Image: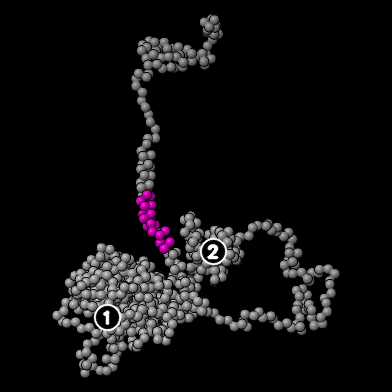
Amino acid sequence: MSINTNCCSSFGSNESLAVCSTDGVLHIWDVRSGQEKQQYTPASHLAASFTCLSWKIPHHRDKQELNNPKKKKKKLKQKESQEDKLEFIALGTAVGDILLYNCLNGELVFKYSGGHSDKVNSIAWLNESTFYSCSDDQNIVEWNVTAQNHICKWKAEKREVYSICIGPHSKTILSAGKAIKLWDLKTKELLRRYAGHSTPVISLSTVSPPSLSPRQDASVLEALDGLYFLSAASEDRVLSAWQVRNTKHKKIALCSFLLPSEPVTFDILAPNIPDCPTYLLSLTQDGEVAIFCHALNGPLKKPLSPTRTIKVVTEDAILLNIISATFDKKKDGDSPVVIVAYGSDYNVAFEQINLADHELQDIVIIRKDPTKSEIFMEEDKMKLREPIKNKNASSIAPGVPGHSVGGISGKKRKKLPSVGESQLTMEERLSALSVEPPPVVKETTSAPTADSFSVLLSQGLQSNDRDVLNQVLQHGNETLIRNTVRQLPIHYIIPLVKELTGRLQGSPEKCLTFVKWLRAVLSCHTSYLMTFPDVVPLLSRLYQLMNVRTKTHGRLSRLEGKLDLVMSQIASRKDDEEEQKPLAIFEEDSSDGYEDMMIDGVTIDHSMSSDDWDDFSDADNHVDEIDGGKLNEADEDLLMDEDG
């Protein structure tokens, strides 16, 4: 079952549909032709996606201007055609900015910033030059088209403000968080407070009376006495109807409308005649449209069930996604006409359903899925064609020129007794003439080629074999990866992207190799991915993953730079300390250390007299003469006697 998840869409004058896709791109479709007229992509569409949109209220000319005889008829017709068109769209973003887009020339008129500090939830136009916006920052802001800054701002809730709506006569505004509040636009005073829903109110709308002209001296509440408005909340299957009373104020809803599932948007077709029923249309999360018909004339005890339901399915009973639905206000009659837009953000189809043409309560429209394209091929082209054989043709075998195999005569070729020189190829003849022996070719393992890798990758993706995929995706050679991705069949590109996205969520060590594969896929098959209808949800998950992974990269880079600076300073200080160390150290001893000195094994006392030093020197010279061999025989005998 297809579930509707896109609530950022709106019809304008029943002729155009504006849809904000999940990637932050505005698409404007023509309801009559079903073709996309314009597409606008802001510079910050990935960082600040669109959250809400609102068509500008058309300008209504005064009667004096129409009755002015000085103006020509041609100019009046041109003004009528230009003013009837909705020229501007106000777009709220997730960062609090509001963009004003011109539908006629396809350009951005102005960017309003500074009013909100959080996501913009709803925008409501008061007239052709003034609009209001609410946000998660608890404030309601008033803007002017020609002014850069906001006019005024006031706090409406203690929590988020999810929806706003301009009341009848353009003197009041309704705001809703979980409770619903009625404000005076002139004094910004709180007039009424209603209980609301247990969950956030996502949409508000007033029921305009057929003809109501209050007194000129009437107060704001007296002018709104007896009027109704409706509200829808998230995770709530009930639409509630409330009534504004000047006296006997009640905070609870008068009646409720029971839906088959949670509401996405709703639209109201007010009656042109008093006491006629009001038609209510609501698009649900299950992808169907519920229609109610009820005259708002008092409280009800039980919730009302839908009188009609609309579904769009394929021939295989597959429910198609309905993007938006509205009533055709231009067609008058007893039974309303519903305009339904179904498909996706990039392929939208439209259907006009007149409720009077269908008798059953459950209306089921069988249509083709606009997101899928059909390829037709003739049956003759699917058959294999065999080549035409000519029996009279002759083939020439390599070797002797003119030698035929199976010629016209059909005789068999005689076997030659031996292989002659004429039957050798040119390579064999050159190798026979060479003197050097042929080189010995060693058996080596061949490097993986792109052909084998593309086949293995196709088999692994088709059978979801983890071993084969691990064997292929572990290689990080960029040339091999690029050639493999180029030769991969086109219908395996989406499974490969899904496989790589799942693997990137694993360990960061292996992400470098997977990023190379993913980059090759995006660079080689960008044109195919642009034609794939569900490429935005597929790549949004990948973009969020990479955004989370690289969120702290800037801080880590700055930290790494600071650490490198600290380490370089520490290293420079160590080098300075090493340079200041002395190369040699000389320690001078005191005089007491020279008390005992040994000279040639003799202890010298520093207290000896000069005569003792002379005797010591003579003895020393005597010893030197003995060592030099200058002693005579008598001296030798004398020395021998002394030794004895």
Determine the residue positioned at 48% across, 68% down.
Answer: 522
Task: Say which of 626 and 513 sits in front.
Answer: 513
Determine the residue positioned at 75% across, 74% down.
Answer: 398
Is label 1 in a helix, a strand or a loop?
Answer: loop
Could you tell me residue 375's position as x and y percent? 54, 79
Dot 1 or dot 2: first in sequence order is 1
Could you tell me residue 395's position as x and y percent? 75, 79
Q: Is residue 559 magenta?
A: yes
Could you tell me residue 212's position as x and y percent? 22, 83
Q: CA distance from mark 1 to mark 2?
A: 64 Å
Q: Report crowding for label 2: few under 14, some 14 to 19, many 20 or more residues within 10 A (C-alpha).
A: many
Task: Say which of 123 and 400 sits in front.
Answer: 123
Q: Is residue 589 magenta?
A: no
The magenta span reads: 544-564
Residue 137, by quadrant, is bottom left
Q: Amino acid at mark 1?
A: Ser
In front: mark 1 or mark 2?
1
Where is 526 relative to 337, above or below? above
Task: Say which of 473 and 344 sits in front.
Answer: 344
Q: Is residue 450 visible?
A: no
Is label 2 in a helix, a strand or a loop?
Answer: helix
Q: Report crowding for label 1: few under 14, some 14 to 19, many 20 or more residues within 10 A (C-alpha).
A: some
Residue 469, by quadrant, is bottom right
Could you tell me residue 219's position as x and y percent? 16, 77
Q: Amino acid at mark 2?
A: Ile
> What residue did someone put label 2 on?
481
Q: How is the image coloured?
A: one colour
Q: Are marks 1 and 2 in contact (CB under 8 Å)?
A: no
> What residue did someone put label 1 on?
208
Q: Is residue 28 left or right of residue 600?
A: left
- Main secondary-structure element of the magenta-colored stretch: helix
